[in-house]
Image (cartoon, rainbow, N blue to C red):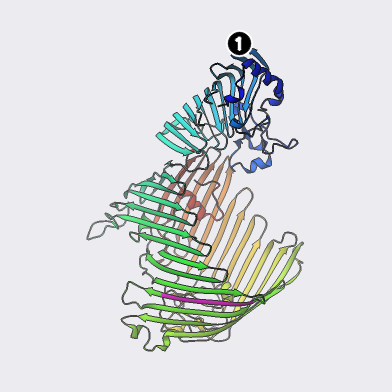
Amino acid sequence: MFNSVKYSVPVKVFCLCALTFMYSMAAQAETLSAPPSSNHAATNVEQPKPLPINNLDWVKKEYMTPEQQVSVAKYCCGAYLEPVRDYPGKEQHPDDASLHVSALSTEAQGDSTALLEGDVNISQGYRQVRSDSAIVDQKNRQIKLDGNVRFREPNMLVIGDHALLDLDSEEVQLENATYVLHEASVRGSAKTLRRQSDGIIIIEDSSFSGCAPSDTTWQLQTSEIKLDQVSGFATVKNARLDVGNVPVFYFPYAKFPISERRSSGLLFPIIASDQENGLDISQPLYLNLAPNYDATLTPRYIQHRGAGIEVNYRYLRHWATTEFTASFIENDKGGNQEYEPKALTGLHPNQGEDRYMMHLQHKGNFSPSWSSMLNVNQVSDKNYFSDIGQIATEENSPTHLSREGSIDYQTDYLQFSIEAQDFQSITAGLDDPFRVASKISLNGHYRYANAVTIDIKNQQAEFKHDDLNQVTGGRTTLDYSLGLDKRWGWGYLKPKIGLRHLDYQLNSPNLATQVSDTLDNRSVTVPFASVDSSIVFEKQSALFSGFRQTLEPRLFYVRSKFRAQQSLPDFDTKEITPSYAQLFNDRRFVGGDRISDDHRLSLGLSTSFIHKKTGQEKFRASLAQAIYLDDRKVSLLDNAQNNSELVRDKSDLALKLKYRINDQWRMDNEIVYNNNDKYWESGFVSLYYNDPKDRLFNLSYRYSRLDSTTSSSPIPEPQIEQVDLSFYLPLGNDFNWVGRWHHDFTNNRELELFTGFEYNNCCWRAGLVIRRWLDRQDDLMPERKIELKNGVFLQVQFKGLAGTGGRLATILKRGIYGYEPVEKF
């Protein structure tokens, strides 16, 4: 405990020297009522006001300095803060420090014993003990302390009625003790607390809680707690979790962190319920296998489906991160469905089958220039996500699962990559897309001092498909351009000329009828030229005082020759959806199977209002339209000549608005108007609210009327009309009200509807959400009958002990724009 080598002198001389040469009692005494501060040298700084010592250094937030308030969790009303140490050697390790003793009076009791009374203060380095009285027994090498015993080390305070210090073993034992660990924000009481010579603290017949001193919302009642501040872990035996003095759980053994370190142990269970699956309980078990890898095993029971397990493994190296997740449910019961069973088998869909999901993700940087990526996903069947979902996340099902990998080499000017990609279709009625057996890319971007730019793009890709009647083979794409990128404070000028080349090496049993009888149509070369320019005019705003107004006309011209391409296959290409940005793009297609023909002049005009002092943009409006100087002929459809969109003289009219109404409100808007047929083709308007009190409100409306008969996409895009309203509203008393309404007017159905509450304070956190949502938000096949699901999601976290998984937080973060959990569950 205390280094005995420093005071191996007769106790009378020891006490006399201590009283004569040490600081006075007032100077040496630990100022328990003095407020803690992170700035020890400051004397005139406003200091916090702690409560009495019985509250274990608990300081209310309103009494803290501004610097201390920043470090306190948002929903906490206070924190455990150590008071300033102001005695000699306060920063030294006890083994390297001298012993200091002070008291109001001393009395010798024999040759080897002395009685110290009145604010006894014994310190050695950062270790300190205080009491009302003490008996120093030099013969037995012990110090007995009585009355208001206070033992301190960094980030720890223990108080009790009596204490016994062993001078040789450096052990200390306190009776009827109360303790606090400041950094971990946990406190408790014990019949006996013993600090061993190795620094391990053993607490017997004790309690443990992460709440404030006056809060008894939850606590652990244990037969023994072992605290290791060096490793940062607490180990408990025979622990009972009491919530509001009601026993709710028993732990025969548990280990959890008392710092930011990770520790193996049980996490709190995840509990949910919905009408199809019934009660859904998952119990995560975290395994801290090594500093750079860990695992979580999660047994799961779904009432109407059966038992299963999920495994999550994470591996971290200095050059790579890898995560593997797999889940499995044996002999699915089929769920509590209203669907009729299959006539032949009498079973519901997927009933009696083994269901599984697998996910592997890897990212690596094994040198400054080389990197690697792997993303592999697989499910047992198309209905896996809609039936079972995932424990880690609560997502709506995607239409396809990607399986891809790549190796990249990149410098300031050059990028080289080798990649492959495959997909698993998990949406009924959709075919599997082509898989990329290999794709080799070599790209370069060079910018010279005179603003000349050179862009080089080379790619060779090999496409495969399981359907033997599909055209497969290789595709070579080349894209070379020479440009000038001149920028000034008043505008820019970016002319560019280039050449694009497309070549196929095809394999098909029906090549002659599906592709072409000639070799010429399998190779296309198209020259192109473009100019993008803009000028910025600026003046003092007459509409808004203190603002500058800009006027920014923009001119974009592109000329790309026509080459017949209808006979070429389509492996991965679709036409870009009309938008403001598309009017200033020199391409009409995403993917490499078409080179667009364009003779187009796009005209744009933008205006903005900018605050002169802050530089913040308050309002911006942009309007643009393209004039087609020639008809367009290249299309993904076979009947391109009948596509009225390709023979228009003018494009759709595109309008964008951004308006920051004030510091809380802002609005975004984009509209595409078909002035040829006089209708609104697509658009969205969004209104956002966010204030310093963390109140959130979002309202958006989305509309699309794309004509599926003239769309170039091989998959018809439906008309869409949706409204999405979400909010996050603090109600006071640590309660927050959350909700979302996402409605599809086109099909008269709810996409998602939920409401619930969050509760958050220093001691515990809980969330409860009642949710109704689509089995799958399938906009590709809106006529399909899709069942709605109802569910209840509950999560609880006892702070300082353990947390739950992230399902509820994911629902809220995905559903409420701007929502960020204050703390992770």
Return the residue nearer the eye: 649 or 439.
439
Q: Is residue 396 above or below residue 542?
A: above
Q: Residues within 10 Å of mark 1 (few under 14, many from 20)?
A: some
Q: Identify the residue at horizontal 37%, vertical 60% (top origin).
A: 378
Determine whether the residue tagged by mark 1 lies in a helix, strand or loop. loop
Task: Tell how many labels.
Answer: 1
Residue 399 seen from this side: no
Q: Is residue 443 left or right of residue 535?
A: left
Span of residues in magenta: 452-461
Q: What is the quadrant of residue 583 in the picture?
A: bottom right
Q: Label 1 sits on what residue type?
A: Gln
The residue beneath circle 1 is 109
Residue in the picture at 32% in, 50% down: 305
The residue sitting at the top extreme is 110
- Residue 458 covered by magenta stretch: yes
Give x and y (percent) for residue 99: 63, 26
Would you identify the image quadrant in which residue 77 lies?
Answer: top right
Residue 694 in sight: yes
Q: Check the picture and name the quadrant holding the N terminus.
A: top right
